[in-house]
Amino acid sequence: MRALPELAISSGSACTSLSIRPSHVLQAMGLSDEWAHRSLRFSFGRFTTEDEIERAAQLFTTIFKKLRK
């Protein structure tokens, strides 16, 4: 997340930001605790455009590939 400061990304929901427990929403969707802990949440604004979403996906993909190496 530090590698992409221009994106609004978090590892949990705002309502559980002080908790280390996995998201109850992700658990309700059937994700295991392990997968819930591995998830990321991308936040979009009311006026976010498709171009901005595409750019965010490109940035994330580029950084993710670098970090996996």
Image (cartoon, rainbow, N blue to C red):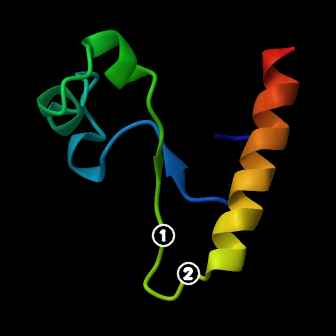
Question: Eyeballing the image, is 35 above or below 64?
Answer: above
Q: Compare residues 48 and 3 and report the one nearer the observer.
A: 48
Residue at coordinates 35% horizontally, 11% vertically from top-left?
34
Disc 2 target residue? 48
Q: Is residue 47 found left or right of 56 in the rendered image?
A: left
State if disc 2 and disc 1 touch (CB < 8 Å).
Answer: yes
> Quadrant of the image for the C terminus?
top right
Q: Is residue 6 visible?
A: no
Q: Which SS class for mark 1?
A: loop
Residue 22 position, x and y percent, is 25, 24
Residue at coordinates 82% horizontally, 28% vertically from top-left?
65
Question: Eyeballing the image, is 39 above or below 48?
Answer: above
Residue 44 position, x and y percent, is 48, 69
Residue at coordinates 46% horizontally, 61% vertically from top-left?
43
Q: Is residue 13 found left or right of 51 in the rendered image?
A: left
Question: Eyeballing the image, is 62 above or below 49?
Answer: above
Number of callouts in the render?
Answer: 2
Q: CA distance from mark 1 to mark 2?
A: 6 Å
Q: Is residue 64 visible?
A: yes
Residue 44: mark in rendering = 1
Label 2 is placed on what type of residue? Thr
Question: Eyeballing the image, is 68 above or below 5?
Answer: above
Q: Compare residues 63 and 3 and report the one nearer the observer.
A: 63
Residue 58 position, x and y percent, is 79, 53
Residue 54: mark in rendering = none
Residue 40 position, x and y percent, is 48, 38
The single residue placed furthest to the bottom in the displayed view is 47
